[in-house]
Amino acid sequence: DTIAETVASTVAAGRASTVREFVRRYLAETDPHELVRRPAATIAAVLADHWRLGVDRRAPIEVRTLAIGDAAAQASVLLVVMEDVPFLVDSIHTVLTRHALGIHLTIHPMLDVRRDIDGSIVDVGGPDGVVEAWTMVEFEACDAATRASVEREVCAVLEDVRSSMADREPMRQRAMSLALQAERSGRPDGEGDAAVHRQNAGTVDGDTVRGL
């Protein structure tokens, strides 16, 4: 469509088909009424910026904020590219709420992305891709200093989320080890079994994510 062609012509150098597929999947589950309410050129510009942010991924978490629209209908946008983790969207919304910034729209597509050894996108939507979260949150207009603060805080809190998820498997293994030791030593209190049950159930305590 028009948006996909505009984005492809803006950012693609011999990769138009990949960019068009990126746009199609990015917007696939977005409410059409939300798209109609915004100029196609603005949507295309945001998607082009998001593509630029994530096409050559060099860090586990990529975050950027920017102003969009004209003076009469201005807003701010937060763009994120990272692996999908629990609390991702809630964490972003919490930071924006802390700054008393109203949230207009959230788009949170899960994209199957295949990258080369340098982290550059090779394919989107193919069978060998790895699922990545490409999250866009449009929020009320604010000054550059506030956007920079939001960007820093979102990056920090998402790094906390990511770290807590990385710690889950070692924690589960440790709990299983303690449970086995308890069983062998004849402990009657069942604490080890309870820990194993909690970890296997995927429980994450409310205070795991710091800064919320």
Image: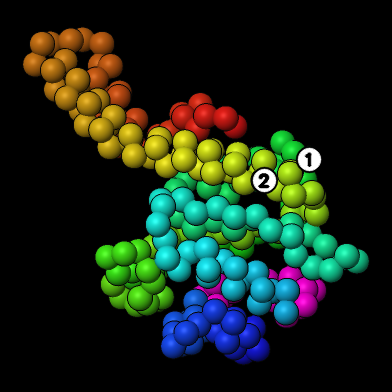
What is the spatial separation of the Cα atoms under label 1 and label 2, in whole angstroms? Answer: 15 Å
Residue 13 location in percent, x, y?
47, 84
Give the mark count.
2
Residue 90 highlighted magenta (yes or no): no
**Which of the colour schemes (rainbow, by chain, secondary structure, one colour) is used?**
rainbow
Residue at 74%, 43% in the rendered image: 146
| In this rendering, position of residue 36 left or right of residue 86 | right
Residue at 17%, 25% in the rendered image: 177
Residue 56 location in percent, x, y?
42, 65
Residue at 60%, 72% in the rendered image: 47
Quadrant in which residue 170 is drawn: top left
Residue 33 highlighted magenta (yes or no): yes
Q: Is residue 4 visible?
A: no
Question: In front here: 86 or 38?
Answer: 38
Kind of residue sitting beneath label 2: Ala
Question: In front here: 96 or 110?
Answer: 96
Q: Secondary structure at mark 2?
A: helix
In the picture of the structure, the residue carrying the numbered disc 1 is 100
Q: Secondary structure at mark 1?
A: loop
Residue at 39%, 71% in the rendered image: 121
Quadrant in which residue 128 is drawn: bottom left
- In the image, residue 47 sits, relative to residue 188, either above or below, namely below
The label shown at residue 148 is 2
Residue 145 location in percent, x, y?
73, 44
Q: Is residue 191 visible?
A: yes
Along the polypeptide, which appears first: circle 1 or circle 2? 1
The segment highlighted magenta reads 23-40
Classify mark 2: residues with Cα within 10 Å, few (<14), some (14-19) or many (20+): some
